[in-house]
């Protein structure tokens, strides 16, 4: 539709900028184009707030929680630091 050409260009500009930035990066980062409530949106959600996992006591759908939990494969910083401390003081064989 010609009457919406400006709006289409406005939406396309960040995509073009991202492609230009990706070409100058080494190693090239993964670029994931997502849409709300689609399968690829899990990548964005897991990186934005990976603090709620299946190990948390508040896991699950509760009445007082407005949204679903965000599950991620990444471990929390605290778990990583605990594991690092444990490895640093253990005896190597």
Image (tube, grey):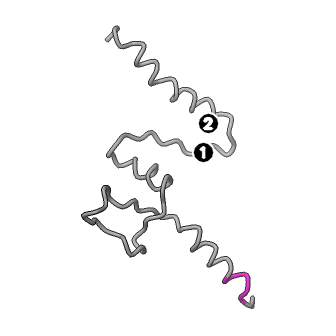
Q: Residues within 10 Å of mark 2 (few under 14, many from 20)?
A: some
Relative to 47, 3 lies left or right: left
Residue under the point 54% across and 26% down:
16
What is the spatial separation of the Cα atoms under label 1 and label 2, in whole angstroms?
A: 7 Å
Label 1, secondary structure: give it: loop
Q: Is residue 56 above or below residue 51?
A: below
Q: Residues within 10 Å of mark 1 (few under 14, many from 20)?
A: few
The residue indicated by pointer 1 is: 29
Task: Compare marks 1 and 2 and give the one earlier in the sequence.
Answer: 2
Residue under the point 32% across and 46% down:
37
Relative to 30, 42 lies left or right: left
Label 2, secondary structure: give it: helix
Residue under the point 30% across and 56% down:
66
Q: Which quadrant holds residue 3?
A: top left
Q: Locate residue 90, reporting x and y percent.
A: 71, 88
Q: Which quadrant holds residue 57?
A: bottom left
Q: Which residues are magenta?
A: 86-90
Tell me, yes or no, whether the two marked residues, 1 and 2, touch with CB atoms within 8 Å: yes
Q: Locate residue 54, reporting x and y percent.
A: 39, 71
Q: Residue furthest front?
A: 64
Total labels drawn:
2
Residue under the point 61% across and 29% down:
20
Q: Is residue 18 above or below residue 86?
A: above
- Which label was assigned to residue 22? 2
């Amino acid at each position: 539709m010609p009457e919406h050409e400006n709006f289409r260009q406005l939406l396309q500009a960040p995509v073009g900028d991202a492609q230009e930035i990706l070409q100058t990066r080494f190693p090239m980062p993964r670029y994931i184009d997502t849409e709300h409530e689609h399968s690829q949106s899990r990548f964005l959600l897991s990186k934005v707030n990976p603090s709620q996992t299946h190990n948390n006591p508040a896991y699950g759908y509760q009445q007082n929680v407005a949204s679903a939990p965000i599950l991620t494969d990444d471990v929390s910083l605290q778990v990583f630091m605990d594991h690092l401390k444990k490895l640093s003081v253990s005896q190597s064989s």
